[in-house]
Image (cartoon, grey):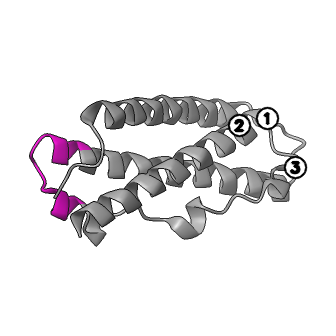
Amino acid sequence: MTQIAPTAFFGKTFDEALVLLVEARDYIAASVCDRPANRSAEEHLRFARETMRVTARLTQIMAWLLAQKAVHEGELTPHQAASEAYRLAGQAVCLDDDASQYAGLPDGLQALLGRSHALYIRVARLDELVRRAAE
């Protein structure tokens, strides 16, 4: 069973995910305090749904990366990390990226949606590579 990617690669991806996670946290926290009073209930709901989508993506990405980090540190075997328990989850929510739904959302949220989706896609590809390598 071969390792498919060096630790440095996962380290860069981990760092990128962590930076994005902090940006998302800060953006969402600021948005809760500064939300416009003229936003309709439907707009509030769309905003909440899409911030939850960003959160779901980043949570799944970080969980997967932490499992890979555990492999590199010898805490998990590659076979264990490739099991269903450590697989990148949430595809139904996280892969959904209908840009037409972004209309009317704040630019900052649109940027987080796009960046988190791109990162989720990359990690999904890595997840597939890890699963294949473990077989």
Most foreground residue, 83 or 62: 83
Give coordinates of residue 78: x percent, y percent: 18, 57
Q: Residues within 10 Å of mark 2 (few under 14, many from 20)?
A: few
Circles 1 and 2 in contact, beta carbons < 8 Å: yes
Q: Secondary structure at mark 3?
A: loop
Per the rendered image, the range of residues in magenta is: 69-81
Neighbour tally class for label 1: few under 14, some 14-19, many 20 plus, Cα within 10 Å: few
Q: Is residue 9 visible?
A: yes
Q: Residues within 10 Å of mark 3 (few under 14, many from 20)?
A: few
Q: Which mark is residue 57?
A: none
Name the residue at 71% across, 37% down. Answer: 111
Circle 3 is placed at which residue position? 103
Q: What amino acid does circle 2 point to?
A: Ala
Residue 24 lies in what quarter of the image? top right
Which residue type does callout 3 highlight? Ala
Residue placed under numbered mark 1 in the picture: 107
User: Where, quadrant-wise, is the C terminus in this rendering?
Assistant: bottom left
**Residue lying at the far left of the rendered structure:** 74
Q: Residue at x 88, y 46 (%)?
A: 104
The x, y position of residue 35, in whole percent, is 76, 37
CA separation, marks 3 and 1? 9 Å
Of helix, strand and loop, which mostly describes the magenta segment? helix
**Left or right: 29 in relation to 3:** right
Residue pointed to by mark 2: 111
Residue 57 image offset from top left, x and y in percent: 52, 52
- Measured Cα–Cα span from mark 2 to mark 3: 12 Å
Which SS class for mark 2? helix
Query: In the rendered image, is residue 60 in sight?
Result: no
Q: Earlier in the sequence, mark 2 or mark 3?
A: 3
**Quadrant holding the N terminus:** bottom left
Q: Check if residue 113 falls in the magenta segment.
A: no
* Relative horizontal placement of residue 109, taking residue 5 as reference (left or right): right
